[in-house]
Amino acid sequence: MIIALKPGVSQEDIKKLASDLEKLGVKIDYSQGSNQTVLGLVGDTTVVDDEALKANHLVEKVIRVQEPYKRVNRMFHPLDTVLDFQAGGSKAKIGGGVFSVIAGPCSVESREQIIEVASAVKKAGAAFLRGGAFKPRTSPYSFQGMGCVGLDILLEAKKECALPIVTELMEISQLELFEDVDVIQVGARNMQNFNLLKELGRCRKPVLLKRGMASTMTELLMAAEYVMAGGNDKIVLCERGIRGFDNFTRNILDLAIVPALKKKTHLPVIVDPSHATGLSWMVPAMSKAAIAAGADGIIVEVHNDPEHALCDGEQSLTPAVFSGLMDTLRKYAALEGKVI
């Protein structure tokens, strides 16, 4: 249930109304706009008398929310969520009119590799460094990542290049290792790992939540709801492609979900053209399409030696190609009223 209050209602009156509602057993999320406050009621709202609320002199309108997701719903939170970051002397943002570019290799392979790639993507204009220390792989014989050593290398690159880092968490037991990680990535395979999502709701650290390879939009939003229900509203949604019957590309990039998500939720939405296509030569075109679709950013794989990469070399851009792509994306972003 959504309660939109009239402009100019005092904080004292808001607290009194909220207190009366909480006595009924519902929880309240507050959304404060420039001149209006919105109360989002979560729980068994059947105990709330709609007509009595509508008659209240503080209330402008009352709306029953039909969707199963509440806290991530734009009706509960009309203003876009914007996330701010800082690493060393560098500042970064996701949302708020910025087209954020997250770039780096699929997996950490060595200190020299990460430092070289981090320096290159930072110079080209990337705002975040990505890299996998722990890697979920379809085959048990594939490279599984460097683990804790890889995480230490990423943190070293963060310090040396002043870039916030994004890396994947695979299980709850690893969470204590991620204290200095800026954004915790939840991969497609873990999108509905509800125990993990609940724990991330309690940790208050920004979460990049990737859409499952066979998940609907509602399932993605409900996964985000798990994190928000725990008290963590620092969430970025990521479209990374879904399964289809054609295997020409690795996955099918569902760009139509981007404007749909922007309409349904206040959370920022980014696109992963690397995993979606699996082909490096397609990444630039899909990156430009992501801007046109209204995305808040992209997460792209960049490797200094793709031919010898231990993971996903075929979909990785070289630093030189990435630099040229960034020059192009700045022009496209400007046309959409965004900056990189």
Image (cartoon, grey):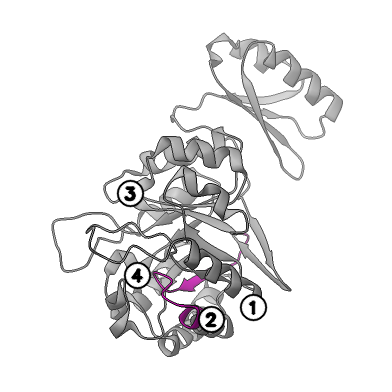
**SS under mark 1:** helix
Disc 2 designates what residue? 115
Disc 2 crowd rating (10 Å Cα; few below 14, some 14-19, many 20+) is some
Spatial CA distance of label 2 from label 3 is 28 Å
Disc 4 designates what residue? 274
Spatial CA distance of label 2 from label 4 is 21 Å
Q: Nearer the viewer, mark 2 or mark 3?
A: 2
Spatial CA distance of label 1 from label 2 is 8 Å
**SS under mark 3:** helix
Q: Residue furthest front?
A: 149
Spatial CA distance of label 4 from label 3 is 17 Å
Q: Nearer the viewer, mark 4 or mark 3?
A: 3
The three-letter code of the residue at mark 1 reads Glu
Q: Which residues make up the magenta segment? A: 96-115
Q: What residue appears at the point 16 percent right and 69 percent down from the top-left corner?
A: 248
Asked whether, in this view, residue 32 is left or right of residue 228, the answer is right
Asked whether residue 114 is in view, the answer is: yes
The three-letter code of the residue at mark 3 reads Arg
The circle drawn on residue 160 is 1
Is there CB contact under 8 Å for labels 2 and 3? no
Seen in the picture, residue 260 relative to 93 is either above or below; the reply is: above
The circle drawn on residue 189 is 3
Asked whether, in this view, residue 142 is left or right of residue 109, the answer is left
**SS under mark 2:** helix
The three-letter code of the residue at mark 2 reads Ile
**SS under mark 4:** helix
Is there CB contact under 8 Å for labels 1 and 2? yes
